[in-house]
Image (spheres, rainbow, N blue to C red):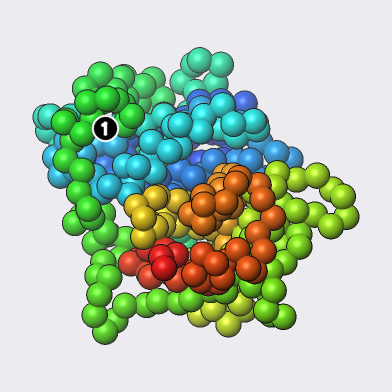
Amino acid sequence: MNNESTLLHTGFRDMVLLDPIRQGADNLKIISGYATNTMASWHIKQIAESENRLSPINIILVVGMCGYDGISQSVHEGFKALVARNNTPHQSNFACQYVLDGIPVHSKLYLWERNGHPFCAFMGSANYTQSAFSRSRKELLHECDPLQALGYFKELEGVSIRCDHAEVDDKIIIRPFHPVLEAEESSNVSVSGENVQKVKLSLLKQDGDVGFGSGINWGHRPNGIKREPNQMYIPLPAAISRSDFFPLEGNRAGKDNPHFSVLTDDGINLVLRVEQQGNKAITTPLNNSQIGEYFRNRMNLPNGVFVTKKMLEDYGRTDVAFIKIDEEQYIMDFSV
Protein backbone atom coordinates (compact mmCIF):
# COMPACT_ATOMS: atom_id res chain seq x y z
CA MET A 1 0.00 0.00 0.00
CA ASN A 2 0.95 3.63 -0.41
CA ASN A 3 2.87 4.83 2.65
CA GLU A 4 1.42 8.33 2.28
CA SER A 5 -1.48 9.01 4.61
CA THR A 6 -4.66 9.49 2.58
CA LEU A 7 -8.00 10.91 3.66
CA LEU A 8 -10.77 8.96 1.93
CA HIS A 9 -14.21 10.54 1.68
CA THR A 10 -15.70 9.06 -1.49
CA GLY A 11 -15.37 5.89 -3.53
CA PHE A 12 -13.42 4.11 -0.81
CA ARG A 13 -15.42 0.88 -0.73
CA ASP A 14 -13.12 -1.16 -2.97
CA MET A 15 -9.97 0.50 -1.65
CA VAL A 16 -10.77 -0.47 1.93
CA LEU A 17 -12.62 -3.79 1.49
CA LEU A 18 -11.27 -5.42 -1.68
CA ASP A 19 -8.09 -3.91 -3.14
CA PRO A 20 -5.72 -5.13 -0.37
CA ILE A 21 -6.56 -8.72 -1.36
CA ARG A 22 -5.16 -8.03 -4.82
CA GLN A 23 -1.90 -7.11 -3.09
CA GLY A 24 -1.71 -10.37 -1.17
CA ALA A 25 -3.60 -9.50 2.05
CA ASP A 26 -5.40 -12.53 3.44
CA ASN A 27 -6.77 -11.49 6.83
CA LEU A 28 -9.08 -8.56 7.69
CA LYS A 29 -9.60 -7.49 11.30
CA ILE A 30 -12.43 -5.02 11.88
CA ILE A 31 -13.55 -2.96 14.86
CA SER A 32 -16.92 -1.30 14.28
CA GLY A 33 -19.20 0.40 16.76
CA TYR A 34 -22.21 -0.98 14.91
CA ALA A 35 -22.31 -3.64 12.19
CA THR A 36 -24.78 -5.78 10.27
CA ASN A 37 -24.77 -9.36 9.09
CA THR A 38 -26.04 -8.22 5.70
CA MET A 39 -22.84 -6.21 5.24
CA ALA A 40 -20.71 -9.24 6.08
CA SER A 41 -22.75 -11.39 3.70
CA TRP A 42 -22.43 -8.79 0.93
CA HIS A 43 -18.67 -8.51 1.53
CA ILE A 44 -18.14 -12.28 1.36
CA LYS A 45 -20.13 -12.46 -1.87
CA GLN A 46 -18.28 -9.51 -3.43
CA ILE A 47 -14.94 -11.20 -2.79
CA ALA A 48 -16.19 -14.42 -4.39
CA GLU A 49 -17.73 -12.64 -7.41
CA SER A 50 -15.01 -10.08 -8.07
CA GLU A 51 -13.20 -9.90 -11.37
CA ASN A 52 -10.39 -12.48 -11.57
CA ARG A 53 -11.89 -14.18 -8.49
CA LEU A 54 -10.14 -12.79 -5.44
CA SER A 55 -8.83 -15.42 -3.05
CA PRO A 56 -10.99 -16.14 0.03
CA ILE A 57 -9.82 -14.42 3.19
CA ASN A 58 -10.50 -14.54 6.92
CA ILE A 59 -12.70 -11.73 8.29
CA ILE A 60 -12.70 -11.10 12.05
CA LEU A 61 -15.25 -8.55 13.25
CA VAL A 62 -15.38 -7.04 16.74
CA VAL A 63 -18.62 -5.11 17.34
CA GLY A 64 -17.95 -2.36 19.87
CA MET A 65 -21.28 -1.08 21.18
CA CYS A 66 -22.99 -4.39 22.07
CA GLY A 67 -21.98 -4.28 25.72
CA TYR A 68 -23.48 -0.80 25.99
CA ASP A 69 -26.79 -0.91 24.10
CA GLY A 70 -27.12 -4.50 22.85
CA ILE A 71 -27.75 -5.95 19.40
CA SER A 72 -30.88 -6.80 17.42
CA GLN A 73 -32.07 -10.41 17.27
CA SER A 74 -31.98 -10.56 13.47
CA VAL A 75 -28.41 -9.23 13.22
CA HIS A 76 -27.22 -11.52 16.02
CA GLU A 77 -28.78 -14.60 14.40
CA GLY A 78 -27.36 -13.51 11.06
CA PHE A 79 -23.84 -13.29 12.46
CA LYS A 80 -24.16 -16.77 13.98
CA ALA A 81 -25.41 -18.18 10.67
CA LEU A 82 -22.40 -16.74 8.84
CA VAL A 83 -20.01 -18.27 11.37
CA ALA A 84 -21.79 -21.64 11.07
CA ARG A 85 -21.27 -21.73 7.30
CA ASN A 86 -17.46 -21.33 7.52
CA ASN A 87 -15.33 -23.64 5.39
CA THR A 88 -17.72 -23.25 2.46
CA PRO A 89 -15.67 -23.86 -0.71
CA HIS A 90 -14.35 -20.71 -2.42
CA GLN A 91 -15.88 -18.37 0.18
CA SER A 92 -14.23 -16.36 2.93
CA ASN A 93 -14.46 -17.41 6.57
CA PHE A 94 -16.09 -15.09 9.08
CA ALA A 95 -15.74 -14.65 12.84
CA CYS A 96 -17.62 -12.19 15.03
CA GLN A 97 -17.18 -11.05 18.62
CA TYR A 98 -18.99 -8.56 20.85
CA VAL A 99 -17.22 -6.20 23.26
CA LEU A 100 -18.50 -6.78 26.79
CA ASP A 101 -18.65 -4.47 29.83
CA GLY A 102 -16.64 -1.30 29.92
CA ILE A 103 -16.42 1.95 28.03
CA PRO A 104 -18.59 1.93 24.86
CA VAL A 105 -16.44 1.40 21.77
CA HIS A 106 -17.62 3.53 18.86
CA SER A 107 -14.36 3.17 16.87
CA LYS A 108 -14.19 2.03 13.26
CA LEU A 109 -10.96 0.31 12.22
CA TYR A 110 -10.09 -1.89 9.22
CA LEU A 111 -6.76 -3.71 9.58
CA TRP A 112 -5.36 -5.91 6.82
CA GLU A 113 -2.69 -8.56 7.40
CA ARG A 114 -0.55 -10.33 4.84
CA ASN A 115 1.13 -13.64 5.72
CA GLY A 116 0.49 -13.02 9.42
CA HIS A 117 1.90 -9.46 9.49
CA PRO A 118 0.12 -6.08 9.60
CA PHE A 119 -0.08 -4.73 6.06
CA CYS A 120 -2.32 -1.65 5.98
CA ALA A 121 -5.06 -0.08 8.08
CA PHE A 122 -7.85 2.50 7.88
CA MET A 123 -9.75 4.30 10.61
CA GLY A 124 -12.62 6.78 10.48
CA SER A 125 -16.39 7.13 10.68
CA ALA A 126 -17.66 4.26 8.50
CA ASN A 127 -19.38 1.45 10.39
CA TYR A 128 -19.30 -2.04 8.89
CA THR A 129 -22.75 -1.57 7.33
CA GLN A 130 -23.93 -1.41 3.75
CA SER A 131 -25.30 2.10 4.20
CA ALA A 132 -21.94 3.43 5.42
CA PHE A 133 -20.20 2.07 2.30
CA SER A 134 -22.95 3.09 -0.13
CA ARG A 135 -22.96 6.05 -2.50
CA SER A 136 -25.74 7.70 -0.49
CA ARG A 137 -23.67 8.37 2.64
CA LYS A 138 -20.80 10.72 3.47
CA GLU A 139 -18.14 9.03 5.60
CA LEU A 140 -14.43 9.51 6.20
CA LEU A 141 -11.66 6.93 6.41
CA HIS A 142 -7.98 7.69 6.95
CA GLU A 143 -4.96 5.45 6.50
CA CYS A 144 -3.24 4.77 9.83
CA ASP A 145 -0.30 2.83 11.22
CA PRO A 146 -1.05 -0.93 10.94
CA LEU A 147 1.15 -1.89 13.92
CA GLN A 148 -0.67 0.52 16.20
CA ALA A 149 -3.97 -0.70 14.76
CA LEU A 150 -3.06 -4.28 15.65
CA GLY A 151 -2.35 -3.31 19.24
CA TYR A 152 -5.73 -1.60 19.54
CA PHE A 153 -7.51 -4.57 17.96
CA LYS A 154 -5.87 -7.03 20.38
CA GLU A 155 -6.90 -4.86 23.33
CA LEU A 156 -10.58 -5.03 22.37
CA GLU A 157 -10.44 -8.64 21.22
CA GLY A 158 -9.37 -9.52 24.76
CA VAL A 159 -12.55 -8.08 26.30
CA SER A 160 -15.03 -9.54 23.81
CA ILE A 161 -17.11 -12.71 23.49
CA ARG A 162 -17.77 -14.81 20.37
CA CYS A 163 -21.22 -14.29 18.87
CA ASP A 164 -21.81 -18.06 19.00
CA HIS A 165 -20.56 -18.52 22.57
CA ALA A 166 -22.89 -20.62 24.74
CA GLU A 167 -23.24 -17.78 27.27
CA VAL A 168 -23.57 -14.84 24.88
CA ASP A 169 -27.29 -14.39 25.65
CA ASP A 170 -26.39 -13.87 29.31
CA LYS A 171 -23.68 -11.32 28.53
CA ILE A 172 -25.28 -9.17 25.81
CA ILE A 173 -28.76 -7.64 25.54
CA ILE A 174 -30.51 -9.14 22.51
CA ARG A 175 -33.25 -6.77 21.33
CA PRO A 176 -36.16 -7.34 18.90
CA PHE A 177 -34.97 -4.18 17.12
CA HIS A 178 -31.94 -2.02 17.79
CA PRO A 179 -32.94 1.60 18.47
CA VAL A 180 -29.65 3.18 17.35
CA LEU A 181 -28.76 1.01 14.36
CA GLU A 182 -32.27 1.04 12.90
CA ALA A 183 -32.40 4.83 13.31
CA GLU A 184 -29.06 5.06 11.48
CA GLU A 185 -30.16 2.79 8.65
CA SER A 186 -33.70 4.14 8.22
CA SER A 187 -36.26 6.40 9.80
CA ASN A 188 -39.01 3.76 9.60
CA VAL A 189 -38.94 0.64 11.73
CA SER A 190 -42.70 0.21 12.07
CA VAL A 191 -44.42 -2.89 10.65
CA SER A 192 -48.00 -1.70 11.12
CA GLY A 193 -50.08 1.30 10.15
CA GLU A 194 -50.79 3.27 7.01
CA ASN A 195 -47.19 3.61 5.83
CA VAL A 196 -46.31 -0.08 5.80
CA GLN A 197 -44.96 -1.22 2.42
CA LYS A 198 -45.95 -4.74 1.40
CA VAL A 199 -45.80 -6.76 -1.82
CA LYS A 200 -46.91 -10.25 -2.83
CA LEU A 201 -44.76 -12.24 -5.25
CA SER A 202 -46.11 -15.24 -7.12
CA LEU A 203 -44.16 -18.49 -7.08
CA LEU A 204 -45.74 -19.42 -10.42
CA LYS A 205 -44.83 -18.43 -13.97
CA GLN A 206 -46.97 -16.08 -16.05
CA ASP A 207 -48.78 -19.09 -17.53
CA GLY A 208 -49.95 -20.06 -14.03
CA ASP A 209 -47.75 -23.13 -13.54
CA VAL A 210 -44.41 -23.78 -11.83
CA GLY A 211 -41.18 -23.49 -13.75
CA PHE A 212 -38.83 -26.27 -14.81
CA GLY A 213 -35.28 -25.02 -14.40
CA SER A 214 -36.58 -21.74 -12.98
CA GLY A 215 -38.32 -20.29 -9.92
CA ILE A 216 -38.86 -22.72 -7.09
CA ASN A 217 -37.43 -25.49 -9.31
CA TRP A 218 -34.31 -23.63 -10.45
CA GLY A 219 -32.15 -26.62 -9.48
CA HIS A 220 -34.08 -29.03 -11.74
CA ARG A 221 -32.62 -28.51 -15.20
CA PRO A 222 -34.45 -29.78 -18.30
CA ASN A 223 -31.24 -30.06 -20.33
CA GLY A 224 -29.61 -32.63 -18.05
CA ILE A 225 -27.18 -30.20 -16.40
CA LYS A 226 -26.78 -31.33 -12.80
CA ARG A 227 -27.41 -28.71 -10.13
CA GLU A 228 -28.20 -28.89 -6.45
CA PRO A 229 -31.96 -29.65 -6.60
CA ASN A 230 -32.90 -27.29 -3.75
CA GLN A 231 -31.67 -24.25 -5.71
CA MET A 232 -34.47 -21.72 -6.05
CA TYR A 233 -35.29 -18.09 -6.65
CA ILE A 234 -38.45 -16.05 -6.12
CA PRO A 235 -39.45 -14.39 -9.42
CA LEU A 236 -39.43 -10.59 -9.20
CA PRO A 237 -41.64 -8.75 -11.73
CA ALA A 238 -40.03 -5.78 -13.46
CA ALA A 239 -42.59 -3.34 -12.08
CA ILE A 240 -41.70 -4.25 -8.48
CA SER A 241 -37.98 -4.40 -9.27
CA ARG A 242 -38.16 -0.81 -10.53
CA SER A 243 -40.26 0.39 -7.57
CA ASP A 244 -37.37 0.63 -5.04
CA PHE A 245 -39.16 -1.76 -2.69
CA PHE A 246 -36.10 -4.01 -2.64
CA PRO A 247 -32.57 -2.52 -2.40
CA LEU A 248 -30.80 -2.20 -5.75
CA GLU A 249 -27.45 -0.56 -6.31
CA GLY A 250 -25.65 -2.69 -8.88
CA ASN A 251 -25.95 -3.12 -12.62
CA ARG A 252 -28.78 -5.01 -14.31
CA ALA A 253 -27.00 -8.29 -13.55
CA GLY A 254 -27.47 -7.61 -9.82
CA LYS A 255 -23.91 -8.37 -8.77
CA ASP A 256 -23.43 -5.26 -6.64
CA ASN A 257 -26.92 -5.25 -5.13
CA PRO A 258 -27.09 -4.97 -1.34
CA HIS A 259 -27.97 -7.96 0.79
CA PHE A 260 -31.03 -7.67 3.01
CA SER A 261 -32.15 -9.56 6.09
CA VAL A 262 -35.48 -11.38 6.25
CA LEU A 263 -37.31 -12.63 9.31
CA THR A 264 -39.89 -15.22 8.24
CA ASP A 265 -43.28 -15.48 9.88
CA ASP A 266 -42.13 -18.72 11.56
CA GLY A 267 -39.04 -17.10 13.07
CA ILE A 268 -36.27 -18.05 10.60
CA ASN A 269 -33.61 -15.49 9.62
CA LEU A 270 -32.48 -15.44 5.98
CA VAL A 271 -30.22 -13.12 4.00
CA LEU A 272 -31.48 -12.42 0.48
CA ARG A 273 -30.45 -10.40 -2.57
CA VAL A 274 -32.02 -9.39 -5.87
CA GLU A 275 -30.01 -11.11 -8.61
CA GLN A 276 -29.86 -12.19 -12.27
CA GLN A 277 -30.00 -10.19 -15.48
CA GLY A 278 -32.64 -7.50 -15.22
CA ASN A 279 -32.86 -7.89 -11.41
CA LYS A 280 -35.58 -10.48 -11.87
CA ALA A 281 -34.91 -12.94 -9.04
CA ILE A 282 -34.60 -13.04 -5.24
CA THR A 283 -32.39 -15.71 -3.74
CA THR A 284 -30.01 -16.47 -0.87
CA PRO A 285 -26.70 -15.18 -2.27
CA LEU A 286 -24.17 -17.19 -0.26
CA ASN A 287 -26.00 -20.47 -0.94
CA ASN A 288 -28.94 -20.38 -3.33
CA SER A 289 -30.11 -23.79 -2.09
CA GLN A 290 -30.90 -22.32 1.34
CA ILE A 291 -34.10 -20.61 0.25
CA GLY A 292 -35.25 -23.74 -1.60
CA GLU A 293 -34.66 -25.83 1.50
CA TYR A 294 -36.69 -23.36 3.53
CA PHE A 295 -39.74 -23.49 1.25
CA ARG A 296 -39.65 -27.28 0.88
CA ASN A 297 -39.30 -27.79 4.62
CA ARG A 298 -42.10 -25.29 5.25
CA MET A 299 -44.41 -27.33 3.01
CA ASN A 300 -43.26 -30.60 4.66
CA LEU A 301 -41.68 -31.79 1.41
CA PRO A 302 -38.43 -33.75 1.07
CA ASN A 303 -35.29 -31.74 0.35
CA GLY A 304 -34.62 -31.47 -3.36
CA VAL A 305 -38.06 -32.62 -4.54
CA PHE A 306 -39.54 -31.09 -7.70
CA VAL A 307 -42.30 -28.78 -6.45
CA THR A 308 -45.54 -28.92 -8.44
CA LYS A 309 -48.36 -26.37 -8.53
CA LYS A 310 -50.57 -28.92 -6.75
CA MET A 311 -48.05 -29.13 -3.87
CA LEU A 312 -48.25 -25.37 -3.45
CA GLU A 313 -52.05 -25.44 -3.62
CA ASP A 314 -52.21 -28.30 -1.12
CA TYR A 315 -50.03 -26.25 1.22
CA GLY A 316 -52.44 -23.34 0.90
CA ARG A 317 -50.82 -20.62 -1.22
CA THR A 318 -48.86 -20.00 -4.40
CA ASP A 319 -47.32 -16.68 -3.42
CA VAL A 320 -45.18 -15.13 -0.69
CA ALA A 321 -45.50 -11.69 0.91
CA PHE A 322 -42.74 -9.26 1.94
CA ILE A 323 -43.16 -6.42 4.44
CA LYS A 324 -40.46 -3.73 4.35
CA ILE A 325 -39.07 -2.50 7.67
CA ASP A 326 -36.14 -0.56 6.21
CA GLU A 327 -33.58 -0.92 3.41
CA GLU A 328 -31.89 -3.89 5.09
CA GLN A 329 -34.70 -5.58 7.03
CA TYR A 330 -37.88 -7.28 5.83
CA ILE A 331 -40.48 -9.74 7.05
CA MET A 332 -41.36 -12.65 4.74
CA ASP A 333 -44.82 -14.20 5.19
CA PHE A 334 -45.57 -17.68 3.81
CA SER A 335 -48.21 -18.52 6.40
CA VAL A 336 -51.54 -20.20 5.65
Occupied quadrant, residue 29: top left
- Give coordinates of residue 188: x percent, y percent: 27, 70
* Amino acid type, mark 1: Tyr
Give the vertical position of 152 relative to 236 (above or below): above
Give the vertical position of 147 relative to 309 (above or below): above
- Taking 184 as reference, is 217 left or right? right
Q: Residue furthest right?
A: 223
Frontmost residue, 327 versus 164:
164
Which residue is found at the position 29% from the left and 37% from the top?
Answer: 63
Q: Residue furthest top?
A: 116
Which residue is found at the position 50% from the left and 15% from the top?
Answer: 116
| Residue bearing mark 1 | 98
- Taking 252 as reference, is 75 left or right? left
- Give coordinates of residue 230: x percent, y percent: 64, 48
Which residue is found at the position 31% from the left and 77% from the top?
Answer: 196
Q: How many marks?
A: 1
Instruction: Report helix, strand or loop for mark 1.
Output: strand
The answer to whether residue 213 is visible is yes
Give the vertical position of 248 relative to 1 (above or below): below
Give the vertical position of 138 relative to 153 (above or below): below
Callout 1: 10 Å neighbours few (<14), some, many (20+)? Answer: many
Frontmost residue, 106 versus 123:
106
- Taking 120 as reference, is 204 left or right? right
Please state, as top left, top right, bottom left or bottom right, where the N terminus lies in the image: top right
- Give coordinates of residue 153: x percent, y percent: 32, 25
- Taking 69 as reference, is 268 left or right? right
The answer to whether residue 254 is visible is no
Which residue is found at the position 58% from the left and 82% from the top?
Answer: 239
Q: Residue furthest left?
A: 102
